[in-house]
Structure formats: C-alpha cells, structure tokens
Image (cartoon, rainbow, N blue to C red):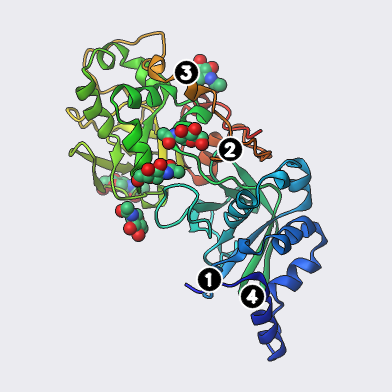
C-alpha cells in the first residue's frame, strides 16, 4: 500500500491537475467548502489522517463545522486520538451516494487499522433511509446523516456529514452501552469474556435480556461448562458476517461445533434457527454482533414460525425469572466504564447526534422487521 503524507498527496493531485485533468484536488475541494473548515484545518494540522490513502479510490467523510461545535472537547484529545478517529472517516473505496440502494446497506473498510482487534479493517456502514436520506453508522451507537453528497476529487469523493462517527468498542463496552447485560454476564459466568473479546473476526448472536429471563430457571442452574457450550453456540468464528451476508438457507458452524440455519422470511424478518434478529450489524472491535429474541439451544435446532411476532423459547420446561440472569457476574468495575467512547482513558467529547432509538431506526432502514426493538432501549450517548 502506498503511503501519502498530506503534502505529497496534494503535490500528486496538483501534478495531475496541472497535467490537464479537470477534477479538483482533495485540498481544493475541502478548501472550497466553508462548511467543513474545522475538518480541513484538522487535516492540515494532523496530516497522518490521510496516511495510507488508497490510490484506487477513497471516500472522505467530512463532518461539518456544526459537528465539531457540538463536540467541542474532541479537538482537545491527543493527536493520536484525533488522528485515529478521523482516519475512521476515510473509507478505502469510492462510495457514491447516488449508487446506494434502499435495503442494501454497505460496509466499507476505513483507514483506521490499529484501534481495536477487528481484522480486515474497521468499517463504516452506509445505507439509504426513507426519503433518500443517507445514514452513516459507526461504532458505539454513533450515526450521522449525509448532507452534501458526492463531491469528486482526483482520488475519490468527499461526503459531508452532520456528526462525528466513533470507532467500534469491545464487547464489554458495547454490551454496557446497549444494555445487553444478561448476555455480558453469561459470558463472564461461562469464563468466555476474555477470549470472545480478544479473538479476531467473530460474528456473535446476542440474545436480548428478556430472552435470558424467559428461560431463567434452566440457564441459571447450568454448570459453567454447560453454559459455555450454550454461549459458544451463539458465536461464529473466523467470519465477520454483516446482515447482507446472512443468506437465506445458509448454514453456519458455531464455535460450539453445532450448526445454525439462516432463514429470511418474505417479510424481511431474518431468523437464526428459530430466533429472530431484532437489531442487525452492531459493529464491535473484533467483529459484528446481531441481537436476537431468544437464546439458541444446541439440542433443539428450532424452525421459525413466521406468523408469530415473537418466537417461543427453545428450552423445554424452562420457566421465567423476574430478575436479570447473570448480571451479578459482571464485575462492578465494568459497569462504570460504560459510554466512554473509545479506548482512551480520557473523556473524549464525542457525542453522537441522534443515537437514541438507534436500533429501531437501523432495523427499519435495513428492512429488518422492527420486532421487540424497544427492549434494547436508547443506544449509546457518548459524552
Ligand atoms: C480476519 O479476516 C480477514 C479478512 O477475511 C483476514 O484477512 C484476516 O487474516 C483474519 N484474521 C484472523 C486473525 O483470522
Ligand atoms: C487484541 O487482541 C490481543 C490478543 O489477540 C489482546 O492481547 C489485546 O488486548 C487486544 N487489544 C484490544 C485493544 O482489545
Ligand atoms: C428463503 O427460502 C425459503 C425456502 O427455500 C423460501 O420459501 C423463501 O421464500 C426464501 N426467502 C426469500 C426472502 O427469498
Ligand atoms: C473494553 O474497553 C474498555 C474501555 O476501553 C476497557 O476498560 C475494558 O478493559 C475492555 N474490555 C476488554 C475485555 O478488553
Ligand atoms: C436494561 O434492561 C432492563 C431489563 O430488560 C431494564 O429493566 C432496564 O430499564 C434497561 N436499562 C436501560 C438503560 O435501558
């Protein structure tokens, strides 16, 4: 991969420009858009942001000035931190908003490579909402709306967006932010938290809290090793499967060894065995997490009943409990780190404009059935 500094990039682009190509350089595009002057000044101050800009085409997601005004603390972070977060705003492909199709979100690698343990890139999701609005979704509940689309420069395209995007967090912070506390506690109880948060390239199906409550009597009485088998049945190793990759009738091999079948109903609902996906595509540092409505059981494959709004639990003779199973297994120190945006010990000042009800919106926009979305509540507010 070629590495450009800002100056060499400008020089290269300028060279092309002088040679007679009519496209503008990235420099002149950004300089000409007064609405992104803060972003432009940060790129000039921290030229490493554009290090590794792919010669084959890039998309620069330029947050507008209002995004930085809302996040006044952001520029007070360390140069490394600022550089990393803004590298998350540079996509390794030319993505044109006019080519996006409703119901077909795309996930593109960014220039940020070393933030967490995702392998093969840390991605940003772009998708078309109703009314041709384009949403951009990052990690930790961050989302943004495209406000000025498809400004060409010699090496790609600039998209002006209205909020900062935040790189994905790890499993612990993500579970805390989205309130997947029984799932998180069960990982602790099964002694899997460390391996699940440090293994690269995982796809995880995380049951909502109510799913653990519904089978509380059965799941809380298991030995730690039996619980580990159940939890491993929710993890697909060595594959990061965003929702478009969950193909109808495909079969996935879990970490437990058993297999899961994907069913896509004609009404867009997607099922893993008989459990329905409630919220797809929550990016984590080492992969992706999809929220499901029931705990999966290796001993009971289960087939969805598509006419039911909510699928039935697949643990025979389990009864529900009123408390939240496994939440007492979460170390007290963990709960206090929630909503800190990014692996930096200091407060980051990164605030997402509209992360409340994220999951419901994502579900709607990606064509997933809304299901029981309210249970995962307000997503992260990154203060
Ligand atoms: C993760 O997946 C990427 C993309 O397929 C691959 O290049 C990388 O080697 C994988 N990493 C590990 C540790 O398996
Ligand atoms: C990345 O994974 C390694 C083990 O593969 C682990 O030691 C390290 O702490 C992880 N880093 C982060 C930021 O999670
Ligand atoms: C998925 O496959 C099933 C069985 O082959 C089929 O009935 C169903 O229509 C397919 N769903 C979609 C969305 O194509
Ligand atoms: C997840 O990230 C938080 C915040 O950076 C950190 O305190 C915690 O130790 C990490 N958890 C794991 C399991 O790596
Ligand atoms: C987390 O989930 C529990 C049970 O599902 C609920 O009682 C609680 O209000 C939720 N918390 C938030 C912040 O949504």
The image quarter in which residue 119 lies: bottom left
Look at discs 2 and 3 and give the one toward the viewer: 3
To which residue does mark 1 refer?
54
Q: Is residue 84 left or right of residue 34?
A: left
Check disc 3 and report its element: helix, strand or loop: helix
Can see residue 119? yes
The answer to whether the residues at label 3 and label 1 have Cβ atoms under 8 Å apart is no
Counting from the top left corner in percent of width and height, residue 174 is at 48, 34
Check disc 4 and report its element: helix, strand or loop: helix
- Distance in Å between CA atoms under marks 3 and 1: 43 Å
Relative to 20, residue 271 above or below: above
- Distance in Å between CA atoms under marks 2 and 4: 31 Å
Mark linked to residue 87: none
Can see residue 278? no
Look at discs 3 and 1 and give the one toward the viewer: 3
Pick the residue in front: 156 or 328: 328
The answer to whether the residues at label 2 and label 4 have Cβ atoms under 8 Å apart is no
Label 2 vs 1, first from the N-terminus? 1
To which residue does mark 2 refer?
341
- Distance in Å between CA atoms under marks 2 and 3: 19 Å
Counting from the top left corner in percent of width and height, residue 175 is at 46, 30
Quadrant, the C terminus: top right
To which residue does mark 3 refer?
332
* Category of crowding for the residue at label 1, using alpha-carbon neighbours closer than 10 angstroms: few (below 14), some (14–19), many (at least 20): many
Relative to 380, residue 315 above or below: above
The image quarter in which residue 227 lies: top left
Check disc 1 and report its element: helix, strand or loop: loop
Pick the residue in front: 248 or 30: 30
């Amino acid at each position: 991969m070629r590495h450009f500094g800002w100056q060499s990039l400008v020089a290269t682009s300028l060279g092309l420009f002088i040679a007679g190509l009519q496209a503008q350089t990235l420099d002149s595009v950004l300089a000409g858009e007064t609405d992104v002057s803060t972003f432009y000044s940060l790129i000039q101050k921290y030229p490493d942001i554009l290090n590794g800009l792919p010669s084959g085409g890039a998309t620069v997601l330029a947050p507008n000035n209002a995004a930085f005004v809302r996040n006044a603390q952001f520029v007070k972070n360390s140069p490394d931190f600022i550089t990393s977060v803004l590298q998350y705003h540079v996509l390794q492909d030319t993505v044109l908003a006019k080519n996006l199709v409703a119901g077909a979100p795309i996930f593109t690698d960014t220039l940020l490579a070393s933030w967490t343990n995702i392998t093969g890139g840390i991605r940003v999701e772009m998708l078309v909402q109703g009314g041709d609005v384009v949403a951009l979704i990052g990690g930790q509940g961050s989302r943004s709306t495209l406000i000025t689309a498809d400004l060409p420069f010699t090496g790609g395209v600039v998209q002006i967006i209205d909020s900062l995007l935040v790189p994905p967090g790890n499993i612990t912070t993500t579970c805390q932010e989205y309130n997947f506390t029984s799932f998180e506690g069960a990982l602790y109880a099964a002694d899997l938290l460390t391996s699940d948060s440090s293994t690269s390239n995982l796809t995880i199906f995380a049951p909502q809290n109510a799913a653990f409550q519904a089978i509380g009597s059965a799941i809380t009485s298991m030995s730690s090793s039996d619980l580990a088998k159940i939890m491993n049945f929710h993890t697909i190793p060595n594959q990061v499967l965003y929702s478009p990759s969950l193909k109808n009738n495909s079969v996935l091999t879990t970490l437990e060894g058993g297999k899961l079948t994907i069913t896509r109903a004609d009404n867009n609902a997607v099922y893993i065995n008989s459990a329905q996906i409630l919220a797809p595509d929550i990016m984590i540092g080492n992969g992706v997490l999809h929220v499901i409505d029931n705990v999966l059981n290796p001993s009971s494959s289960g087939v969805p009943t598509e006419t039911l709004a909510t699928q039935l639990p697949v643990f025979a003779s389990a009864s529900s409990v009123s408390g939240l199973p496994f939440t007492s297994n979460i170390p007290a120190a963990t709960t206090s780190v929630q909503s800190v945006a990014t692996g930096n010990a200091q407060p980051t000042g990164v605030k997402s404009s509209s992360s409340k009800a994220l999951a419901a919106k994502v579900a709607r926009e990606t064509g997933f059935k809304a299901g029981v979305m309210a249970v995962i509540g307000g997503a992260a507010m990154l203060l």
